[in-house]
Image (cartoon, rainbow, N blue to C red):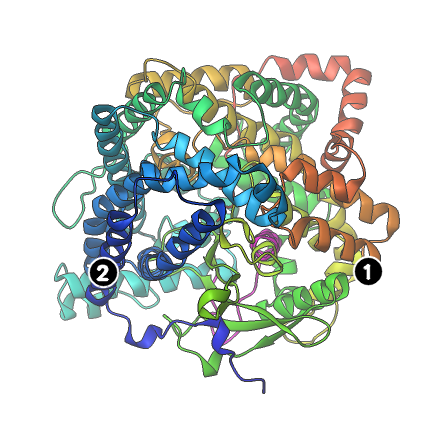
Amino acid sequence: MTSISANLRLVDFDNVAPDTLQNQVISAIDTANAFLDNMSAATDDITAKQALADIMTFDHINLALDRSWGILSHLNSVMSNDEIRHVHHELLPKLSAYSTRVGQHQPLFSRYQTIVNDTAFFAALEPARARAIELALRSFELSGVALPKAEQENFAAIQSELSTLSATFSDHILDATQAYALALKPEQLAGLTESGLALLADAGEQFKARELASGALTQAEIDALPTPYYVASLNIPVYLAVMTHADDRNLRETLYRAYVTRASEFDKHTNAKGESLNNAYIMSQILQLRVQKAKLLGFDNYAEVSLSTKMADSVTEVETFLRDLAEQATPAAKQDLAQLQKYAQDYGITELQPWDSAYVAEKVKQSEFSLSQEEIRPYFPLPKVISGLFAIVERLYGIKVQEHSKSVSRWHDEVSFYQLFDADDNLLGGFYFDLFARSGKRGGAWMSGFQSRYTYAEQNHEQLPVCFMVGNFTPALDGKPSLLTHDEVLTLFHEFGHGLHHLLTQVTVSDVAGVNGVEWDAVELPSQFMENWAWDAEGIALISSHVETGEPLPKDKLAALLAVKNFQSGMQTLRQIEFALFDLLIHAQTPALDYDGILATLNTVRDDIAIMQTPDYNRFANGFSHIFAGGYAAGYYSYKWAELLSADAFSKFEEDGIFNPITGKAFRETILSVGGSFPAKTNFENFRGRSASIDALLRHSGFDNAKNDDAANTESNAQIDDQTNAQTNAQTTREVI
């Protein structure tokens, strides 16, 4: 077995303590501040060469902070508890203050300017270094480096408060999700699958353990509960099992209401301190502070701040893109809705509601496509999916993956670790998989680029990229490996696409290595691109085999799975556009919206976009972590924007062969290897040989056919138009990095 390279610089998770990490973060900040204190304000006699040396020294000093804070942030996401959360949140103001100081530090800023002003020196720099300097100068501007002293202090206070509010927003969602538990009666279990019942039983055991640990129930009371004890929770695998298969409509509505009112005025749960989990005030405060920040920086609104770092040029351009795509998707969405409404009648549902959509959609799949998620789940055992995924990327990019879980320290027994090698057995990097839902872990799926590729020759320092890929999949139950739905397979491929973007970089300037420095509306290109191989017959053959017999996915089920690719595509696209347009518009408002204004904007967007009615109590926005606690503020459109790029990029493989090694090599060299060292538009055009086209996206989504069908079926559509109020309860979208 290949040994673990020292250049991976892996973390000893067995000996990581929150208070130790806290001390390390504080020490790292102190060291970096001392360097800034000693940096001369006079730059007249500083050459561009010396300025660059100072910058590179400072970058190297910050490695210690990146590492210690990166570990703590990661643990707070995957193993949150009171101790970790306390330390994490206590450090946020210190980190915010430090970050603001760096962004407003005139001597440091001047050194970047010195380099750029020496045109000959700047022109001779390697492209990655030059790009990093250009992006740094933009970051200085967006950090208020040009502001008067008093306004800089105001900016710093805003940044600090925003970091705290975002963390609290995220805490509220996690606490609200994990606080909910609904014990089920035997009659409520009708329709649930074997795997669904196993999930509910496992949730019941977790409930017993929590109640006993908190003192809410005694051991005698726990012992008096039935075994198995079926409990519905809001953790995604459990939630979807109920919403997709439970025959009890009232149960589905109850669980739906609980899910869409998390962290709202309707949620009566409290945290460990007895405090409300309602995010309403936090949302309005975040928007208010973002507007203040925008005004200080000379922008009309926060959306303009966000777009200043993205591929898209303006709010108008993004809004036009979204509304045009909505127009393209609406005919297909109306057909999707009509299909659900037709089948709903067979199950006594005269008026389709959001809590019915997943349930009826599953019935349609079974009837129209002879496809059931439960029937195909045994064909996607996680070990087979993972080995097939590795086989796919080996064929595409000539890379090899080796597992080394037993020889490295991990934060949980369920976590696995792998090393990535090129065709010549050169080590490229390492990654962790943490794929199962559990208590203390935030929902969704993401890739975290913990450590970037980086070289600092002055101290003979070299580090290889390392990342964390995290999911909340159905865990292994009843002695069987985890059996994935195809949606979960897509999620794994998605996050692995992000991981490859981080790991395959050849850039050694960390600020633009891997996903760093990539425009946010292009960062989803490699992830969405990777999903295509989970929709291809050759790809599916590599990732599927029956968990007990080892038999491949039968041809009829394969055909059904491929046929169902665009099932409900129209409605799901409108749902994503609804999210994106809502996000864009609330951040384009000045003055900032209050909570009522936020809800009113969402309702206006639904009136414009949605084709299915949403209950008045739905508080989706209160759990919209992407924009209130993540990096997607005024940027959620990035998913659809990057999907356009992804579809167009994959069309090159459709032309050349989906496993064409030459095309794979070209994608690796022009997109994955270069990271953020060039603008995303340049990288895409270098691969595709032209600008991006929307044609492939429309074709992959099935909208070109739907539009033609719509024109030919005016009468049918006229009937559908009578029900234009509404919206599907589409599944939660995959989170990203």
Is 163 on the left-hand or right-hand side of 328? left
Q: Nearer the viewer, residue 44 or 160?
A: 44
> What residue lies at 56% left-to-right and 56% top-to-bottom?
502
Disc 2 is placed on an element classified as helix
Which residues fall within the magenta stretch? 472-498
Q: Which residue is mark 2?
A: 27
Q: Say whether residue 488 is magenta.
A: yes
Mark 1 or mark 2, whichever is nearer to me:
2
Disc 1 is placed on an element classified as helix
Residue 360 quadrant: top right
> What residue lies at 46% left-to-right and 45% top-to-bottom?
47
Which amino acid type is shown beneath numbered disc 2?
A: Ser
> What residue lies at 76% left-to-right and 26% top-to-bottom?
706
Dot 1 or dot 2, earlier in sequence: 2
Residue 388 position (above or below residue 643) = below
Q: Nearer the viewer, residue 94 or 579?
A: 94
- List the single residue furthest toward the right: 656
> What residue lies at 31% left-to-right and 39% top-to-bottom?
105
Percent of width and height locating residue 78: 36, 59
- Visible in this render: residue 206? yes
Residue 61 numbered tag: none
Residue 661 numbered tag: 1
Residue 32 quadrant: bottom left
Which amino acid type is shown beneath numbered disc 1?
A: Pro
Percent of width and height locating residue 288: 29, 22
Q: Quadrant of the N terminus?
A: bottom right
Percent of width and height locating residue 126: 62, 50
